[in-house]
């Protein structure tokens, strides 16, 4: 079977239909203008036909007072006592002293086989304004260099520093109940 030549077929020879004429919506314009005219006529027709004027309202209230023979009582002046007495109050709270924890917390941010890796992490932590230490420890699997921060008196302080390090993309720090001994 011979390949067909689709290029020789050419393009469509029919011209595109012209875009529709944009005509104004005359019916909508006429209805809108007539409604605006009716609204303006309504406002003009009720102009000056208020049921009462201000002068009539004042005289009618005076007439009611004269008919009853009694004037309305004056509004009493309000006195607020709390404005004067509130600054004199004090509240006493009983607070018990919390015992300081015996165990101090340390935060370990890394453990490396090579000392220069531990020193690099210590430098990154120092750029965040925190002081880290590199401690070597000998275990069953050999010599390790741990990067630790602390000691912290409370876990809240350790968490605060850990969040500071997390914002600096130093992730993986763990808080432990360790002793430096």
Image: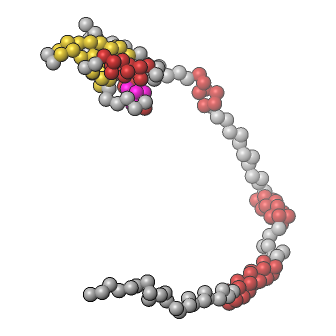
Residue 175 visible (yes or no): no
Residue extending farthest to the front is: 2
What is the span of residues highlighted in magenta in the rendered image? 162-166
Q: Quadrant of the N terminus?
A: bottom left
Residue 171's x, y, as percent?
34, 30
* Vertical side of 175 occupied by 42: above or below: below
Frontmost residue, 6 versus 73 = 6
Q: Is residue 114 left or right of residue 61?
A: left
Q: Indicate the colouring scheme.
A: secondary structure
Q: Is residue 157 left or right of residue 14?
A: left
Q: Quadrant of the C terminus?
A: top left
Residue 179 visible (yes or no): yes
Q: Is residue 77 left or right of residue 153?
A: right
- Identity of the residue drawn at 67% across and 88% down: 23
Residue extending farthest to the left is: 140
Q: Is residue 148 magenta?
A: no
Residue 70 falls in image quadrant? bottom right
Frontmost residue, 7 versus 24 = 7
Residue 179's x, y, as percent?
26, 11
Residue 89's x, y, as percent?
55, 23
Considering the whole magenta stretch, tell me its main secondary structure. Answer: helix
- Identity of the residue drawn at 30% across and 87% down: 2
Q: Is residue 108 left or right of residue 166?
A: left
Residue 27 falls in image quadrant? bottom right
Residue extending farthest to the right is: 55
- Identity of the residue drawn at 77% across and 83% down: 37
- Identity of the residue drawn at 71% across and 42% down: 76
Question: What number of labels is visible?
Answer: 0
């Amino acid at each position: 079977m011979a390949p067909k030549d689709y290029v020789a077929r050419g393009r469509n020879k029919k011209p595109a239909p012209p875009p529709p004429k944009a005509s104004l919506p005359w019916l909508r314009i006429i209805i809108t203008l007539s409604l605006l005219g009716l609204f303006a006529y309504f406002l003009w027709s009720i102009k000056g036909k208020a049921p009462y004027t201000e002068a009539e309202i004042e005289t009618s209230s005076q007439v009611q007072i004269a008919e009853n023979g009694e004037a309305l009582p004056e509004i009493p002046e309000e006195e607020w006592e709390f404005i004067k007495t509130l600054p004199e109050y004090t509240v006493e709270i009983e607070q018990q002293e919390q015992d300081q924890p015996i165990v101090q917390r340390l935060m370990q941010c890394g453990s490396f086989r090579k000392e220069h890796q531990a020193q690099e992490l210590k430098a990154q932590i120092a750029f965040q304004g925190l002081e880290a230490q590199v401690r070597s420890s000998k275990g069953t699997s050999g010599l390790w260099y741990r990067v630790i921060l602390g000691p912290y008196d409370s876990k809240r302080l350790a968490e605060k520093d850990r969040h500071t390090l997390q914002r600096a993309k130093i992730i993986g720090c763990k808080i432990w109940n360790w002793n430096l001994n």
